[in-house]
Structure formats: structure tokens, C-alpha cells
Amino acid sequence: MFGLDGAEVAPYRTGKVREVVPGPGDRLIGQSANVPDDCIYARSASGVRFRAACPDGFEL
């Protein structure tokens, strides 16, 4: 077995990552290529992109 002698063990927790939802000011960029029912948004403050459900009535 490979490893480091005396290395610390970092515990982890099991669970689910919370669902990301668009907030006020987040910008809709377009439809997700991998999941047709989802859209790509950009956070208003940081510009970080994320995938979430498209708004009702969204069509390209």
C-alpha cells in the first residue's frame, strides 16, 4: 500500500449538495447543452456560472 507515514486523516461527511437556484439579479445565459430542461445562469455578484431549471415558458 502506498501512502505517507504519519499523515493526518481528514474525515468527510456524506450527503447531498444543495440544489442551486437563481436569485435576484442572476443573469440567464442560455440553455444547457447536456441537460435540455436546464439553463445556464451567471451569479450577479461573482459572475460564477451554474446550471438550474429554465424559467417557465423559456424557448430558444
Image: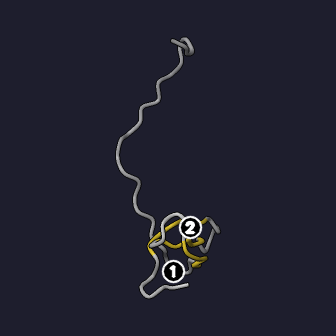
Residue 1 position in % (x across, y down):
50, 11
Q: Position of residue 45 (x, y in %)?
A: 62, 71
Quadrant position of the C terminus in the picture: bottom right
Tally of marks: 2
Question: What residue does disc 2 label?
Answer: 33
Which of the numbered marks, if any, corresponds to residue 24? Answer: 1
Residue under the point 41% across and 54% down: 17
Q: Quadrant of residue 48?
A: bottom right
Kindly identify which numbered label has been placed on residue 57. none
Residue 1 left/right relative to 56: right
Tell which of 28 and 7 is nearer to you. 28
In the image, what residue occupies the spot 51% across and 80% down?
24
Quick check: 11 left or right of 31? left
Q: How is the image coloured?
A: secondary structure
Residue at (47% x, 69% y) in the render: 52
Q: Earlier in the sequence, mark 1 or mark 2?
A: 1
Task: Give the SS element for disc 1.
Answer: loop
Q: What's under tag 1, amino acid-wise?
A: Pro
Task: Give the alpha-carbon distance from disc 1 to disc 2, as whole Å.
Answer: 24 Å
Residue located at (40% from left, 58% from top): 18
Return the residue nearer the eye: 39 or 7. Answer: 39
Q: Residues within 10 Å of mark 1 (few under 14, many from 20)?
A: few
Q: Amino acid at mark 2?
A: Ala
